[in-house]
Amino acid sequence: MTIESLFDDPDGTREEIMKATYEALCTHGYADLTIQRIGDEFPKSKSLLYHHYDSKDALLLDFLAYMLEHFETGVPREDHPDAAAHLRAVFDHVLPDELDEGRREFTSAMVELQAQAAHDPEYREHFTRSTRFFHDRFVTIIENGIEQGVFRDVDPDRVATLLMATIDGARFQRVTTEGDDDIAAVRDELQAYVETRLHVDGESEDDE
């Protein structure tokens, strides 16, 4: 499931509001976003926005919840036949060599939203839940790899924490600096970590 696919065919008022929020957020970012600008992307009366939401942040928090709801129900839970290949596919997806303009704008906006969590407890609550969701997906992949005999008997929670921190840092750097050239290096080093630290056939410092 991609972010864009969530908004392909809205089938109700809330879905249309979420699509309008997505489009306005990509265009204006958090700082310049207003309910009025979201209303400009909304096909129905702007009064509906003010009826459902009393502030920009109330709408954005519902938007974040909407996305997470769909990821929680839409991400496949079945086992992958090769956990190492599964991790590699995740790295390639979240850290592609290049971002198209739409994905870059959306990633930038999400970094802005996550920054609000530093001082806003409602944003912090959401991003804590969101991080835990993706962290737990990494834990599942690693546990599957251990069961498959592909990975060493590592602590899945600690490994998932490292992977999340590295990916989040790379995503932040990508949209706040001229850092696209570094993304391939981050992805390659993550893969090297999997091969040397996790893979049963790898060589790690523990073997020395």
Image: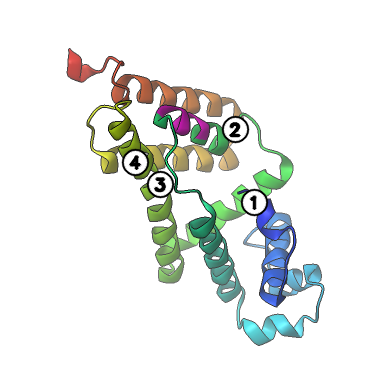
Label 1: how many Cα within 10 Å (few below 14, some 14–19, many 20+)? many
Neighbor class of circle 3 (other Cα within 10 Å; few <14, some 14-19, many 20+) is: some
Determine contact: label 3, label 2, CB under 8 Å: no
Q: Look at label 2 and name its amino acid.
A: Pro
- Range covered by the magenta-colored residues: 84-89
How many angstroms separate mark 3 from mark 2 (CA)?
A: 19 Å
What's the mark number on residue 96?
2
- Say which element carries label 1: helix
Q: Which residue is mark 1?
A: 106
Residue underneath mark 3: 137
Can residue 146 be found in the magenta stretch?
no
Query: Distance from label 1 to label 3 (Cα)?
Result: 22 Å
Q: Residue 160 has which mark?
A: 4
Circle 3 sits in a helix, a strand or a loop, which is it?
helix
Q: Disc 4 and disc 1: Cα gap in Å? A: 24 Å
Work out whether mark 1 precedes mark 2 in sequence or the reverse, and give the earlier one.
Answer: 2
Earlier residue among tags 3 and 2: 2
Along the viewing direction, whichever of 15 and 50 lies nearer the viewer: 15
Q: Quadrant of residue 121?
A: bottom left
- Circle 1: residue type: Phe
Q: Amino acid at mark 3?
A: Arg
Sequence-earlier tag: 2 or 4: 2
Q: Main secondary structure of the magenta part?
A: helix
Magenta span contains residue 88: yes
